[in-house]
Image (cartoon, rainbow, N blue to C red):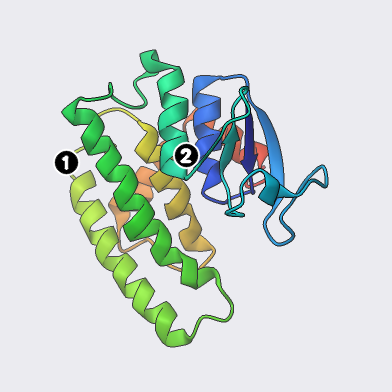
Amino acid sequence: MKLFFAPGACSLAAHILVEETALSCTLVKVDLASHKTEHGDDYTKINPKGYVPALQLDSGDVLTEVGVVLQYLSDQKKDLHLMAAAGTLERYHQMEWLNFIATEVHKQFSPLFRPDSPAQTKEQHTKILGRRFDFLSDHLAKQPYLAGQAFTAPDAYLSTVLGWSHHVKIDLSPWPRLTDYLARVRARPAVLKAMKSEGLIK
């Protein structure tokens, strides 16, 4: 397999699961501005959408969209329980979290990274994120991880997205449960390894 990633992007969640599962996977860095891989190849020939992650299987098939890639990686090592068994209610709840993070948290950050976004737009999205953080904080008051007592694939995604707060100057201190959660996830050896590999930490 090959995982196409950009340092610090949402593909970090997939990179974390590659480390968690210890699957044999080649990492290929992508420059999202030029759409070139680190080898100079045209990334849009791998993923015409142009963004990361993309997971190229040994068969040549390519999977995109972080929630799908996370589920695929998790299902390769079912004994780790990074996703519950297909068809179970627990699995649907984990998919619910993946969708929530993608549509209600991840996408709210997008305008905050764009230098041409109007100040009013950034303010609106920051307020929406605050409401999402309130919801997440209330949920994490009941349990240490999104799906319960153990780390699962949705935690790889949420921790990646929450980590963007610093870059867009959102102070997470009003949500101490989120800062505690982020520290808890980032203390995992696989997370540290992925972040170091991408040059995000020393």
Q: Residue at x 31, y 74 (%)?
A: 127
Q: Tell me: 51 left or right of 178.
A: right
The answer to whether residue 99 is visible is yes
> In the picture, which quadrant includes the N terminus?
top right
Q: Residue at x 34, y 44 (%)?
A: 98
Q: Tell me: 138 left or right of 183.
A: left
> In the picture, which quadrant includes the C terminus?
top right
Residue 105, relative to residue 42: is it above or below?
A: below
Report the disc number at residue 182: none
Residue annotated with mark 2: 186
Q: Nearer the viewer, residue 188 or 115?
A: 115
Which kind of residue does numbered mark 1 sit on? Answer: Lys
Q: Tell me: 38 left or right of 134.
A: right
Given contact means CB atoms under 8 Å apart, are the residues at marks 2 and 1 in contact?
no
The answer to whether residue 148 is visible is no
Residue 87: x %, y % from top left: 22, 25
Report, in whole angstroms, how far the alpha carbon at label 2 lies from the one at label 1: 20 Å
Q: Tell me: 182 left or right of 31.
A: left
Q: Residues within 10 Å of mark 1 (few under 14, many from 20)?
A: few
Residue 55, relative to residue 169: is it above or below?
A: above
Callout 2: SS: helix
Q: Quadrant of residue 2?
A: top right
Residue 198: x %, y % from top left: 66, 42
Which kind of residue does numbered mark 2 sit on? Answer: Arg
Residue annotated with mark 1: 142
